[in-house]
Amino acid sequence: MTTYDVLVLGEINADLILRGDVEPAWQQHEKIVDDMALVLGGSSAIFACGIARLGLRVAYVGVCGPDTIGQFCVQALNAAGVDTSHVIEDPQVRSGLTVVLQKPDDRAMLTYEGGIPLLRAEQIPASLLAASRHIHIGSYYLQHALRPGLPHLFARMRAKVAPPHSTPTGIRVRHGPVSTPCFHIRICFYPTMLKRVPSVDSQT
């Protein structure tokens, strides 16, 4: 099996960006905007494309539907050199889409989640985990089905790369505009802050 530098678990969605006078006019008024663009969206997918272009071997796992948006996103990942052979296409799901209303100094976003929150930890093949050196997970708050399985997923990765009595594996959590390195700690999420609590593994 191919080995990967990074395994990315994340969302599959496109961004439809509208620019100009994007303030909606209700009561069925039609407005003309200046520009539009359909691009690959999602922080995880953008990250995967970026590191693949830097030469790393990247695999991506997410959930999409058998639709135009899903095909567009997968093709964009492939074009950047990302392996999408493990992307899950669910015939019962429609792919996610964000409509971005872009002003010169601000923007608003309307998101249809679709398959974004549906990826589950048990859907990640054990062989893929074994073939990956690092896991990257983005859009934590949107990954509703994935979150409950993350502790076990991280434990499996840590057991693979960190033999007993070795230095603990690092986990890097992105929260807002900064990336906080966390080593051998429990991570508790709050709406307005990231709090780190010392691990109690040795006490249980």
Image (spheres, rainbow, N blue to C red):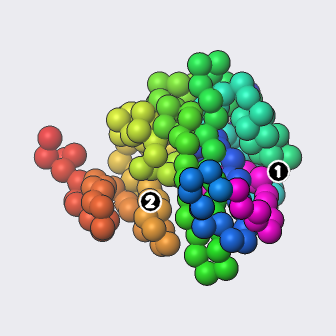
Q: Is residue 149 above or below residue 178?
A: above
Give the class, few, some or many, for how many residues have Cα within 10 Å of label 1's Cα (few <14, many ≥20): some
For the C terminus, the quadrant is top left
Does residue 188 show up magenta in the picture? no
Per the image, label 2 sits on a secondary structure element best described as strand
Q: Is residue 108 visible?
A: yes
Give me the residue at 30% from left, 61% from top.
191
Give me the residue at 30% from left, 57% from top.
189
Point out residue 171 in the picture as x, y percentages from the top left corner: 44, 55
Point out residue 201 in the picture as x, y percentages from the top left corner: 22, 46
For the N terminus, the quadrant is top right
Give the class, few, some or many, for how many residues have Cα within 10 Å of label 2's Cα (few <14, many ≥20): some
In this rendered view, identify the residue nearer to me: 39 or 6.
39
Q: Which residue is mark 2?
A: 173
Per the image, label 1 sits on a secondary structure element best described as loop
Does residue 32 show up magenta in the picture? yes
Point out residue 91 in the picture as x, y percentages from the top left corner: 64, 18
Q: Is residue 27 left or right of residue 154?
A: right
Whichever of labels 1 and 2 marks the residue nearer the N terminus, that label is 1
In this rendered view, identify the residue nearer to me: 137 or 43.
43
Callout 2 amino acid: Val
Residues rendered magenta in the picture: 30-44
Give me the residue at 62% from left, 51% from top.
28
Q: Which residue is mark 1?
A: 80
| Picture quadrant where residue 95 is located | top right
Callout 1 amino acid: Ala
Of all residues, the one furthest to the right in this rendering is: 79
Q: Is residue 120 above or below residue 163?
A: above
Residue 26: which disc? none
Q: Are marks 1 and 2 in contact (CB under 8 Å)?
A: no
| Picture quadrant where residue 51 is located | bottom right
